[in-house]
């Protein structure tokens, strides 16, 4: 049941079946706004809505205990929200718009969490920026550089996965932050991974891998705190593989093979180079197991028999010394 009373100042409706028992409508001569007030059964003001020319311009909520304003929302002349606050939830926000009506900026303040958020959008609605802070320290998800960079922080410390995109939205790179000051970086080209690089304390640490545009692996390297200890280069077209093992600070062993057949070995130590080549060689893990000598350093058909590690011999001063050294090594490997 409801009853309506009309007079020159107000329209009052009584609602006996709800908590809101009065609704009062009038025009505010100072602002020119049409106002609608709602009251509870005790006559306390609960809310007020103000409009002009049929467009909502302001909403206000009240604390019935003391009549103070508890919440409010302001709208522009097109009915778009421009400001909002709520004292109970300690929340406030503000909005601006592009000339075409799309949201331009959003500002949010959360007093309970003590968080601040700033967002920007393009005229087409694409999010270009999202900055979030807690206690004025970067925290949570961040979008920067016109939407091309995505970052994440945990109270000022980088965390999670950071991503970079080109202006067409294609993924360019990812960097994942891991425990123990480690990161894992991935580079992309046309959504194909082209590089994987692990780091610790900002230095390359772990297994690095490179790939071509079709996803074929072309390189693999092992690093310890920025120092390379092993590398493998692969030619996807010829399937030729070259491995380089660094056994100590001044010695490198380089192996080249294809389809499991070793085609060349080079040992470098203290600036001295010793080159060897074999035919009909069998290889395992890139090292010679058995083969027939055909070139410098392996004379008179002397067979070379090695295990998993190739001997780090230096180039002798004479061919006689070289042959003697290799015969000695051969006998040693054969247990003679």
Image: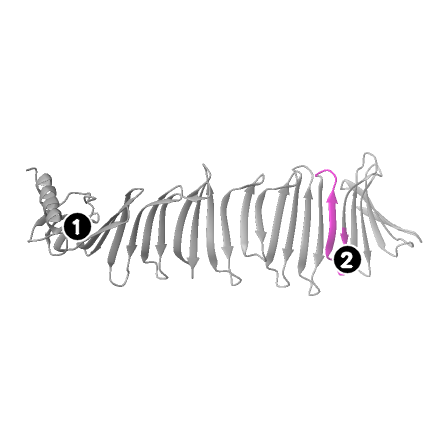
Residue beneath label 2, please? 76
| Front residue of this view, candidates 307 and 160 | 307
* Residue drawn 12% across the image and 44% down it: 325
Residue 213 place in picture, x, y as percent: 37, 61
Mark 2 to mark 1 CA distance (whole Å): 78 Å
Which quarter of the figure is the C terminus placed in? top left
Q: Is residue 202 left or right of residue 331?
A: right
- Under tag 2, what secondary structure? loop
Q: Residues within 10 Å of mark 1 (few under 14, many from 20)?
A: many
Q: Are marks 2 and 1 in contact (CB under 8 Å)?
A: no
- Under tag 1, what secondary structure? strand
Inspect this view and state whether residue 16 appears.
no
Closer to the N terminus: mark 2 or mark 1? Answer: 2
Residue 327 place in picture, x, y as percent: 9, 45
* Residue drawn 74% across the image and 53% down it: 82
Determine the residue located farthest toward the right in the rendered image.
8
**Is residue 75 positioned above or below 336 on the image?**
below
Q: Which mark is residue 56?
A: none
Residues shaded magenta:
74-89
Q: Residues within 10 Å of mark 2 (few under 14, many from 20)?
A: some
| Front residue of this view, candidates 71 and 246 | 246
Residue 273 place in picture, x, y as percent: 24, 51
| Front residue of this view, candidates 2 and 202 | 202
Determine the residue located farthest toward the front in the rendered image.
317
Residue 54 place in picture, x, y as percent: 80, 60
Residue beneath label 1, please? 283
Name the mark nearer the viewer: 2 or 1.
Answer: 1
* Residue drawn 78% across the image and 42% down it: 20
- Residue 335 location, quadrant: top left
**Is residue 318 positioned above or below 192 on the image?**
above
């Amino acid at each position: 049941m409801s009853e309506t009373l009309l007079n020159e100042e107000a329209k009052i409706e009584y609602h006996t079946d709800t908590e809101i028992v009065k609704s009062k409508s009038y025009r505010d001569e100072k602002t020119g706004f049409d106002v609608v007030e709602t009251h509870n059964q005790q006559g306390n003001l609960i809310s007020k809505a103000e409009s002009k020319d049929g467009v909502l311009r302001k909403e206000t909520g009240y604390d019935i205990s003391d009549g103070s304003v508890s919440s409010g929302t302001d709208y522009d002349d097109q009915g778009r929200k421009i400001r909002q606050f709520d004292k109970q939830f300690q929340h406030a926000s503000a909005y601006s718009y592009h000339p075409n009506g799309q949201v331009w900026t959003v500002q949010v303040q959360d007093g309970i969490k003590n968080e601040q958020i700033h967002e920007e959008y393009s005229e087409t609605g694409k999010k270009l920026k999202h900055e979030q802070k807690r206690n004025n320290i970067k925290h949570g998800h961040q979008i920067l550089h016109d939407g091309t960079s995505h970052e994440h922080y945990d109270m000022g410390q980088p965390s999670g996965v950071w991503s970079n995109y080109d202006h067409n939205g294609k993924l360019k790179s990812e960097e994942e932050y891991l425990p123990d000051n480690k990161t894992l970086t991935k580079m992309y080209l046309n959504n194909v991974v082209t590089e994987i690089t692990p780091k610790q304390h900002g230095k390359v640490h772990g297994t690095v891998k490179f790939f071509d545009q079709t996803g074929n692996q072309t390189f693999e390297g092992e690093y310890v705190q920025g120092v390379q200890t092993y590398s493998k280069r692969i030619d996807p077209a010829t399937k030729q593989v070259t491995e380089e093992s660094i056994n100590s600070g001044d010695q490198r062993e380089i192996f080249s093979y294809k389809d499991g057949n070793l085609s060349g070995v080079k040992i470098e130590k203290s600036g001295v180079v010793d080159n060897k080549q074999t035919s009909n060689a069998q290889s395992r893990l890139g090292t010679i197991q058995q083969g027939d000598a055909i070139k410098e350093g392996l004379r008179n058909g002397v067979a070379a028999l090695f295990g998993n590690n190739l001997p780090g011999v230096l180039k002798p001063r004479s061919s006689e010394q070289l042959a003697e050294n290799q015969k000695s090594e051969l006998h040693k490997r054969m247990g003679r």
